[in-house]
Image (cartoon, grey):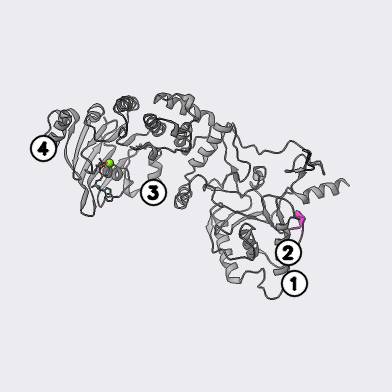
Amino acid sequence: MSAAPLLEAEGLSLRFGAIPALDRVSLAVWPGEVVAIVGESGSGKTTLLRVLSGLARPQAGRVLYRDPAGEAREVHGMGEAALRRLHRSDWGFVHQNPRDGLRMGVSAGGNVGERLMAAGARHYGAIRAQAAAWLRRVEIDPARMDDPPAKFSGGMQQRLQIARTLVTHPRLVFMDEPTGGLDVSVQARLLDLIRALVADLGLAVLLVTHDIAAARLLAHRLLVMRHGRVVEEGLTDRVLDDPQHPYTQLLVSSVLAA
Amino acid sequence: MSAAPGYNFAYLDENTKRMIRRALLKAVAIPGHQVPFGSREMPLPYGWGTGGIQVTASVIGPDDTLKVIDQGADDTTNAVSIRRFFARVAGVATTERTAEATIIQTRHRIPETPLREGQILVYQVPMPEPLFRLEPRVAETRRMHALADYGLMQVKLYEDIARHGHIAISYNYPVMVNGRYLMAPSPIPAFDNPKMHRMPALQLFGAGREKRLYAVPPYTEVRSLDFEDHPFRPPRAEAACALCGSRESYLDEVVTDDRGGRMFLCSDTDWCRQRREAAG
Ligand SMILES: Nc1ncnc2c1ncn2[C@@H]1O[C@H](COP(=O)(O)OP(=O)(O)OP(=O)(O)O)[C@@H](O)[C@H]1O
Ligand SMILES: [Mg+2]
């Protein structure tokens, strides 16, 4: 891992009325690192991803992204055009519900090809070949590339969303409960796939999950959130095997009991 | 000829014409960009070219000569009534000859006779937004234009090729203007798209119901979207005009009897007549 963080947040706060969805959150993500954010429902995980990725604005604090040229840029100060460009090139976002991340009226191949075309690709055959290669990579039969995602199972849709996101080789991917709505057996397969892709591509990932086992499998580091605050953070094994904060202890023990 | 009494010259009042001309100047300054304007009620229903008529009314002067075509023909009801309207309210000369006209208002075609500097081509536009079938949210389409975020349009072309083996758009084929704005050329056949590219005449577009104007200034680059390995190839019927024998012009298919008989005729009636006259 290199010396400078890819993404760096300082003192992020955001209240919805009386609810502190984020309360002075700071974190850093280094290139190639998988950081999991765990915590109970309503603890502010999704809000944190939205603020870090520029989709929502914090009331206090700032987020810096280091671009490929090594320049640190303030995510909430770069303007909408630059932010959009980032979202379709350097960054990716994988939603819990594949419907939020896919175009349901467009074929699987078109879904994967969209980011390539947005980046300027204009050779149909080359776009198609790349889409086919990516479908194969996420274990979808390329023979189905002209089918719409509506004909796919939930697990396939989620794998399609991942292919669509990774096709342009982003450096940083935000994932919000990517295995959320899936059957347990399907979840396990998807987690294995994500793990292999992340390692192959050297991606940095911010992974939001309820699932401690998923965090254990994928994440180098872990942040535990409660009531909008990071109550504990550290290397995944350290936090899970030797939790310091009483809330983390509860979280880990309830998983062990389950 | 002089204008009928009781109307302001060219029907619209001077303030309205000034407002529309200001919008047109902006449109010319930003080729392909849709400019909102305060569309007025016209003595014709929407769908009869009220946007085009307002543009024509705002740029026409007493010395102009007006030609009006509908689907290439000067003698259809719509074309005749718009031509009569301006003859009455502006007292201008009218013509059916493309070369003699200074302003040509059109629905669904570009004349075959190449246009020249000093002429103005006014298009009647039912739907100015090229993205409207792909993105129903108007605010989002504006954002896409502002950021030149047109990947979605390319996806639509990709889907066409995946499904049909070719780009299945024969009318209103989307174009990029001056390398910046995605533009709907109005429902002209894709066959006419190449005529827009670097046209010496000024092209103005008016959408009355949608209250939008846009423009392509003379000699502006207009490129039809495509893929490198599926280049834009405007389709044309593999036939010759039954009247003038043309193999280059855009043809209409005409059913001649109830036993499946049919023939092809030039859609541009003025052009077809000129060819027949020249052939003697
Ligand atoms: N737009 C909003 N308006 C009002 N309150 C909101 C809004 N978004 C989030 N909240 C509140 O902020 C808190 C944090 O919400 P958030 O969605 O970030 O939690 P989460 O950790 O992602 O929960 P879950 O695990 O259920 O997805 C919650 O109390 C939520 O009700
Ligand atoms: Mg959430």
* Residue B60 magenta: no
Q: Amino acid at mark 3?
A: Glu
The Cα atoms of the two marked residues, 3 and 1, are separated by 54 Å
Q: Is residue A8 visible?
A: yes
> Residue at image x 26%, y 28%?
A218
> Toward the viewer: A225 or B23?
A225
Q: Earlier in the sequence, mark 4 or mark 3?
A: 3
Quadrant for ligand 2 reads top left
B246 is higher (above) or lower (below) than A17: above
Residue at image mark 3: A80
Neighbours of disc 2 within 10 Å: few (<14), some (14-19), many (20+): some
SS label for mark 1: loop
For the magenta stretch, what is the residue range?
B95-104
- Badge 2 is on which residue? B84
**Numbered disc 4: secondary structure:** helix
How much space separates mark 4 and mark 3, taking CA atoms?
41 Å
Q: Which mark is residue A246?
A: 4
